[in-house]
């Protein structure tokens, strides 16, 4: 499952399966670990540890995150619960969107156009 999801989204998508019964080294499967630098046996991320301590545990979908080396990530954490509603696992997805943001900013800058103004204020800028 982990490899299939990662292959669907490409090399910039890390997918990890966490076994919450062993909190010291919960990653039991991971694909594209280079995105965050994590590997099999790595500990839980801080954001997941905090979520597990909250009173109402809910999936965290599509939130902004950052890797240790500064990559901007689009992340989700889906909790797997037992029949009593207790979390036993977690599937995390981290997509490095750093290059997409660079392209977005470049396109935005490129699409900026200027119009002559009616006065001493100079040139007005607006986006297309």
Image: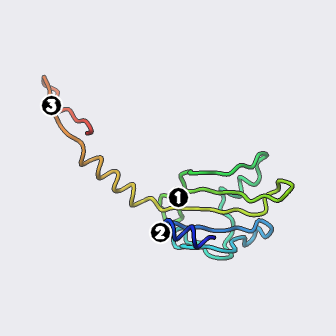
Q: Nearer the viewer, mark 3 or mark 2?
A: 2
Q: Nearer the viewer, mark 2 or mark 1?
A: 2
Element class at badge 1: strand
List x then y, in percent, for residue 92. Answer: 63, 62
- Which residue is the site of mark 3? 122
List x then y, in percent, for residue 115. Answer: 15, 33
Element class at badge 3: loop
Element class at badge 2: loop
Position of 74 with respect to 58 (left or right) is: left
Gap in angstroms between the C-alphas marked 2 and 1: 19 Å
Gap in angstroms between the C-alphas marked 3 and 2: 46 Å
Q: Residue at x 70, y 62 (%)?
A: 90
Question: Which residue is nearer to you in this view: 79 or 40?
Answer: 79
Q: Residue at x 72, y 70 (%)?
A: 26
Splitting the image into 4 quarters, where does residue 98 fall? bottom left
Say few, some or many: other residues with alpha carbon within 10 Å of mark 2 (under 14 / 14 to 19 / 20 or more). few
- Which residue is the site of mark 2? 10
Question: Which residue is nearer to you in this view: 50 or 115?
Answer: 115
Q: Earlier in the sequence, mark 1 or mark 3?
A: 1
Give the quarter of the figure containing the C terminus.
top left
Dot 3 and dot 2 residues touching (CB under 8 Å): no
Say few, some or many: other residues with alpha carbon within 10 Å of mark 1 (under 14 / 14 to 19 / 20 or more). some
The residue sitting at the top extreme is 119
List x then y, in percent, for residue 120. Answer: 13, 25
- Which residue is the site of mark 1? 66
Give the quarter of the figure containing the N terminus.
bottom right
């Amino acid at each position: 499952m982990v490899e299939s999801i990662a292959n669907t989204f490409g090399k910039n998508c890390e997918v990890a399966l966490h076994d919450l019964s062993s909190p010291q080294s919960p990653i039991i499967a991971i694909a594209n670990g280079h995105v965050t630098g994590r590997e099999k046996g790595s500990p839980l991320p801080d954001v997941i540890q905090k979520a597990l301590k909250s009173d109402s545990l809910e999936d965290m979908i599509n939130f902004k995150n950052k890797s240790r080396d500064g990559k901007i990530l689009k992340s989700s954490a889906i909790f797997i619960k037992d029949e009593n509603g207790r979390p036993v696992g977690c599937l995390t997805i981290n997509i490095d969107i750093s290059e997409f943001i660079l392209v977005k900013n470049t396109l935005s800058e490129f699409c900026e156009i200027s119009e002559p103004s009616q006065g001493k204020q100079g040139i007005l800028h607006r986006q297309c």
